[in-house]
Image: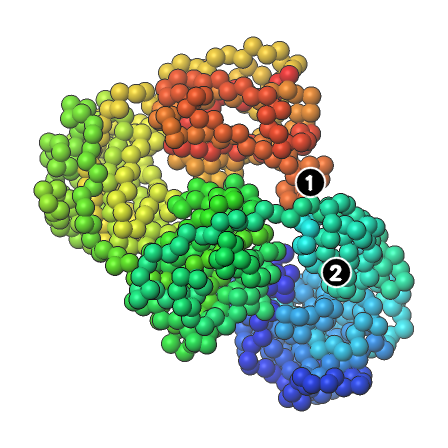
Amino acid sequence: MLVRRWFRILTLVMLSGALGVAGCSRDHGTAPAQFPTEGDVFLDQFGSGVTFQAFLGSKLDAVDIDLTQTQAGTASLNVIVPDSGDPSGSYAGGAFTTTIGRNLSGFDALTFWAKASRTVTLNVVGIGNDNTGTSTYTAEMNNLELTTTWTKFVLPIPLPEKLTAEQGMFYFAEGPEGGAGCQIWFDEIKYEALGTVTSPSADLGTSSRTLEVGEVDTLGYVDVSLNVNGLPHELRAMPGYLTFTSSNTSAVTAGDFGVITGVGQGAAELTAKLGAVDASGSISVTVSAADAAPTVAAPTPTAAAADVISLYSDAYTDVAVTTWSAEWDMADVSDETVASDNVKKYSNLAFAGIEFTTPTIDASAMTRFHLDIWTPNSTAAPAEFKIKLVDFGANGVFGGGDDKEQEISFSATTAPALATGTWVSIDLPLVSFSGLTTRAHLAQLILSSDQLSTIYIDNIYFYDAGEPTVPTIPAPIPTENASDVISLLSSIYTNVPVDTWSAVWDAADVANFTIGTDSMKQYTNFNYAGIEFRTSPINANTMTHFHMDLWTPDPTGSPVVFKVKLVDFGADGALGGGDDLYDELSFDHTIMRTGVWVSIDVPLSSFVDLLTKDHLGQLVLTAPSLNTVFIDNIYFYDSGLPTAPTTPAPAPSQPAADVVSLYSDVYTDVAIDTWSAPWDSADVATYMVGSDSTKRYSNLLFAGIEFKNTTIDASTMTHFHMDLWTPDPTDAPAIFKIKLVDFGADGAWSGGDDVEHELTLDESTMNTGTWVAIDLPLGNFTNLTTRAHLAQLIISGDPNTVYIDNVYFHK
């Protein structure tokens, strides 16, 4: 949940401002023999040495002392929870910490009084978070109901004997509810020895995880319950409160604070005690051989040293890097050597913070960013790898109000494409980081992935490549026969009349631009451009495809989108005459590129709502994020190939009793949650071929078909079948991939028992313009070791448009 992420991720950065009573500075020498036993946090004033530190991203001035609203004594703490969208912070929250640890082992609970200006649900309160990123005894309660009346709350300590030197006295967090903030008051925050805290218990649940030999991992929060005055109080506590035991220490060892280590191949069950009480549940751990590692070095950089600012490379002199793994990140880093080349290895990666704050980097004169990455992990969808650059602004500090940042994602379908077991060179124009509008005080590089737990990186640098601001070579020369083309703009063909290349209602400036003998259009101040040919509408009924070439010097990374709209004015030839039809296609960062010609070539059938094409009168181009665009070779053409099937797929002949059908007019289909999951990159529609229904996928990169709510048991099935039709080229290197995913007995993604396998079909199987029957033995999906809880079918590949039918498993 969001609140938990605040404390595991965002709260690990301590802010310089603090509210409270200043105490002694932390002693970095010999620890005192005995820590204070005072339990006061706030009783009319802050306890000795207690300060309040606001969490990162919260409203920094949310907490103040109130002398009017009190439960007891003369003062309380007033918290202002901001409304949604408040620029001062998205929530209120922070930690009450001490400069010198407290010995709280003589108490059994933290108690406090609270009320609010209206009835709200307080997201979280807790103990043991000292806001340094090194907390080991955090425990929290969630969703406390606050009313307008003072109420006393008790947070029992899971195991008081652990808190002998604790600096994290109390913390809380609350965001706006229903978009509105509120006021909250706290009073009488203190530790007490109630004597009524009984019946401690802990529940590990039942889960599984995998480690590699030599891999170290940390267990997550544990559910803890204690009775206070006979009433149960539920908490989430860090594993440091428990003592873990491994059933097989030759495979897994369990250390303090929930740290486990894979020491040898095998399996072990982890159990635990909360003090002397056995925790329920267990954690199954399987240890496998260590992941593969690169055996060859990353490619040697070729940029001239004079044009480079290097963070890490044997080829250059590196600038100073403050840390390769910031205290607030979630990753482990080590120095490795690959074929005599120094590299950085990140393991247990969620996100890694690389900081170069003293000094920051001025990359204003640089044009590109480079990084080489190698991973042993699967890079198939939905795996992503993200790179974020952060500029701290002229004040050189994070959160100073002038920070800029931008993150770019990479997958198996981006350019460059992620790959497993090989070095991938990511080389990007810095303008692709569109939100990074200043680069004079770069201070952070953040690498993250939810799927790639191990990566090796090398050759991280900025450099000046002398990027052009206008194209220096013409667009590719078209090769379609002139007799099959209707051209609006091209030096190769005879162009039809165009009324205007920038309509009076658009938001762009247009000019002619010439490279040699090739003439094109240059748009500046581009937002959207209206190209009209209403006087002589185009009849494109016999055409099958639309083509245009595009070049831009501007950033094209996500979320930049370039849109192409075609408008048919209908038989009356007038806009708004009642018979107009139009459709718009979008092209994102997977298609768009900076500084190179991009050819947009799509079947006209992709404009699904453009049901008539005999009175085309407008072409509208839209891209609010692009300032400058060059276009050339805009035309319609007949490819000579059908764009949609005209006959149905062959009717299946398998007996219905031997079939589990996802989609077929011949069988009764099982329930499908979605034919296009929110995380995929494809558009789907139902397409009729006569009386036979099919699924048409356009803009296909990868499509997620899910049946998670009612998983499929295909244990007795032997084959998977699908009929496929595409109008697109299927010659090499075109491929089409089919992946099946089984969620395992828990029926949940990432539950630890998922299995999957993907098969790739090439030109030996694929064919253009005809139905292809794909009938695959399930045994070919070798890694799909269980098929009792199938939940996903993922299709991907090079064809832009595919039609599928008769999707089923059979004996």
- Residue 22 shown left or right of residue 618 in the figure: right
N-terminal label among 1 and 2 = 2
Q: How is the image coloured?
A: rainbow
Tag 1: Cα neighbours inside 10 Å, few (<14), some, or many (≥20)? some
The residue type indicated by label 2 comes to Gly
**Place of residue 516 in the rendered image (x, y in percent of width and height, measured from the top left):** 10, 45
Q: CA distance from mark 1 to mark 2?
A: 22 Å
Does dot 2 land on a helix, a strand or a loop?
Answer: helix
Please identify the quarter of the rendering in which residue 564 is found: top left
Q: In the rendered structure, which amino acid carries the disc numbered 1? A: Asp
Task: Indicate whether 282 appears above or below 585.
Answer: below
Judge by depth and name the residue closer to the eye, 761 or 391. 761
Residue at image x 37%, y 66%?
Answer: 309
User: What element does badge 1 sit on?
Assistant: loop
Rendered residue at 36%/25% (across/down): 731
Q: Residue 349: x, y in percent? A: 58, 56
The tag on residue 258 is 2
Q: Can residue 698 be seen by looking at this rendering?
A: no
Location of residue 25 by image quarter: bottom right
Quarter of the picture containing the C terminus is top right
Q: Measured along the vertical axis of the image, is residue 518 above or below residue 652? A: below
534 and 711: which is toward the camera: 711
Residue holding disc 1? 753
